Image: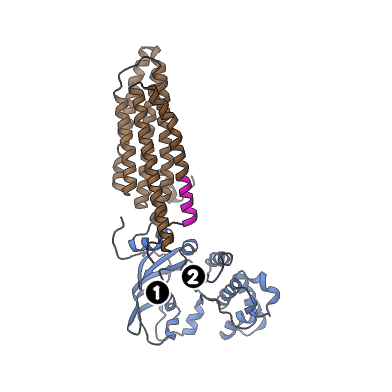
Amino acid sequence: MKEESESAITNAIEDPVLSVENVSLFYGPTQALHDISFRIPRNRITAFIGPSGCGKSTLLRCFNRLNDLLDEVTIRGDIRLDDGSIYAPRVDVNALRKRIGMVFQKSNPFPKSIYENIAYGCRIHGVKRKGRLDDIVEKSLRGAALWDEVRDRLGESALGLSGGQQQRLCIARALAVDPEIILLDEPCSALDPIATARIEELLQSLKHEYTMVIVTHNMQQASRVSDYTAFMYLGRLIEYQETERLFLNPIVRQTEDYITGRFG
Amino acid sequence: MERKQRHFEELLDQLREKVLRLGGLVEQAISRSVRSLVDRDSEMARRVISDDHAIDRLELEVDQLCMDLLGLHQPMARDLRFITTAMKITTDLERIGDHAVNISERALELNEEPQLKPFIDIPLMANRAQEMVRSSLDAFVRRDATAARSTISMDEELNRRMEQIFRELLSYMIEDPRTVTRALRLTFVAKYFERIGDQAKNICEQVVFMAKGEVIKHPRAQTDMEGGSEP
């Protein structure tokens, strides 16, 4: 039988890029995250799993300060990117979001051409020269394994792409501004198994250059793609381990019950 | 989701039940095979041999059920360890059944000739081997790593007795070459019981993995793997 410990969070993270330190988050009076501390390794894929409402997306959104946009959100504790706090007063949030990009559940391309979808962010960050933009567009689309499918129709509307292509376009858009970390919030939940497999393959190929953090409902997906997995429940981080350990032999009973489908 | 879960639990229960039934048949085969020898009961020996197909069939059923569970339900954690353990120990159990058949075959041959010597150590080995099989299965059902480890330690005694029987039979053969055929057959029988002990030990090692996620077999190979050296 499992020991009835409340949580098991590994400290053995060799080269952490993000350190979460005692983070609590409140929506008005309601506490959504409870004193969460752990570290995310560089150039690895970390997955967050847990039942709906467990706080995994909320936690993910803390990493690029997306929760700042909501009224009445209070955050305690700290999150450090390398050595600097991302919540320090002098931090430029736009610059932060350039370093930490995000891909959402529903692909949300701009109602513009495929080319413009990629080039847009770079222009905002000061890249003006056409030749340079062309290079970035090609490199990003190649990085997102989309180039061969769209190279002949870069001027066409991005909305004409299939769901899986749109999602890869959003990943290309995130890559275009050369981030260090990519956050993915349920990136495959609207995709069929083939499009999902392509995204998963893509994540594997990107992991040598980028750190990725993925929120997923799909436990098979978490176990297939990630190196580390965090299990959250009711706003608490219950267990954080190497993925193999967590799925084959979790330490906490609650984790075991969730991944074997006995609750949730 | 909940409906699917209930179905899954039912299948796990079925699997547990089939493995235990298989274990029961195998234990019965061991005890009958030793009786066929000690009581010189050839009828009993033939029964062990013909009943072996029930063991084989149950092995196939367990394999099929495990494949279904793995392929259709994608089990995780303790369920995954339980199913892969059931798959592996079934192979050991089936092999133990084969050893009981081998013992019965030797009994048929030995029963055709005058008894070489009173049976003392062989029934003791048989009891011990049967006890190991039974307690390994108990440990499996209760997911009890401690019981599995203590069962493993029983294997030493079987090895010692095997050595002792071998030495004794060797002295018969040296004294009177006419005993060689019978003595060799009895040596085989002792060896089969010793192998049954080894197989029960395998089951126990698998149970420790199932209960604790800890691999205790082949410690040297494991050290190699951790050191990253090539085999």
Query: What residue does disc 1 label?
Result: A53
Distance in Å between CA atoms under marks 1 and 2: 22 Å
Residue B73 is inside the magenta segment: yes
Q: Is residue A132 visible?
A: no
Q: Which residues are magenta?
A: B62-74
Mark sitting on residue A112: none
Q: Is residue B132 visible?
A: yes
Q: Colour of chain B?
A: brown
Residue A217, position in %: x, y? Answer: 46, 68
Q: Residues within 10 Å of mark 1 (few under 14, many from 20)?
A: few
Residue A16, position in %: x, y? Answer: 42, 69
Position of residue A222 relative to residue B60, above or below, is below
Q: Colour of chain A?
A: blue
* Foreground residue among A18 and A254: A254
Mark sitting on residue A212: 2
Residue type, label 2: Met
